[in-house]
Amino acid sequence: MEYLNYLLAVVICFISIYAGFFLALIAKEELKAGNKYFLVFQKAILAVVVVSTIFVIDNVYVSFILLGVLVYFMFIAHHVKDIFIYLLFGVLLYLNSEYGNLFLMQSALVFLYGLPAGSLLTFKMIRRKKSKILTSIFMKYIWFVVVALVLFMVF
């Protein structure tokens, strides 16, 4: 895969958090009612991304590690920060960068994951100033972009 295509996909996935933030600002009254649905939507997307990677990866050890991570995020850790999940997404996007259609599908799913993630962040930080929320989102989630790009450049 070309570097520019990969970079563009990763940056668009990162921008989805901001899109979720702005959607939450537009529909503030829907945040409280949609909170539980956002969490279910996120877990479903996480499961699809990890399971689709497991089917493609030939390494048994990596598959078991990914399966363990999926079980941990789905059933054990109920209040896991999205930062860790985004770091996992960065690794998974790198692992699937050689498979064009799968990479495209997973990039779209990570984008869809970012919409409720940004909305839930807005719900948690609703009392802060908007500029502080935007800076906080950037500082926390830029590691997703860094991990994805460093893996692509090094390996």
Image (spheres, grey):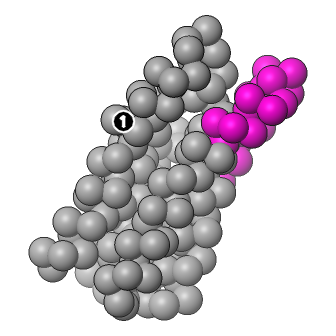
Q: Main secondary structure of the magenta part?
A: helix
Residue 114 percent location from the top left of the image: 58, 49
**Which residue is depicted at the point 34% across and 35% down?**
139
Query: In this rendering, would 104 be left or right of 39?
Result: left
Quadrant of residue 3 in the image? bottom left
**Which residue is depicted at the point 56% across and 45% down?**
17
Residue 127 percent location from the top left of the image: 61, 9
Magenta range: 20-47
Quarter of the figure with the C terminus:
bottom left
**Which residue is depicted at the point 59% across and 52% down?**
16
> Can see residue 77?
no
**Which residue is depicted at the point 43% across and 66% down?**
10
Residue 149 percent location from the top left of the image: 27, 67
Q: Foreground residue, 91 or 122? A: 122
Query: In this rendering, would 130 be left or right of 95?
Result: right
Measured along the vertical axis of the image, is residue 138 above or below residue 151? above
Measured along the vertical axis of the image, is residue 87 above or below residue 138? below
> Can see residue 6?
yes
The amino acid at mark 1 is Lys
Asked whether 81 falls inside the magenta stretch, the response is no
Name the residue carrying label 1.
140
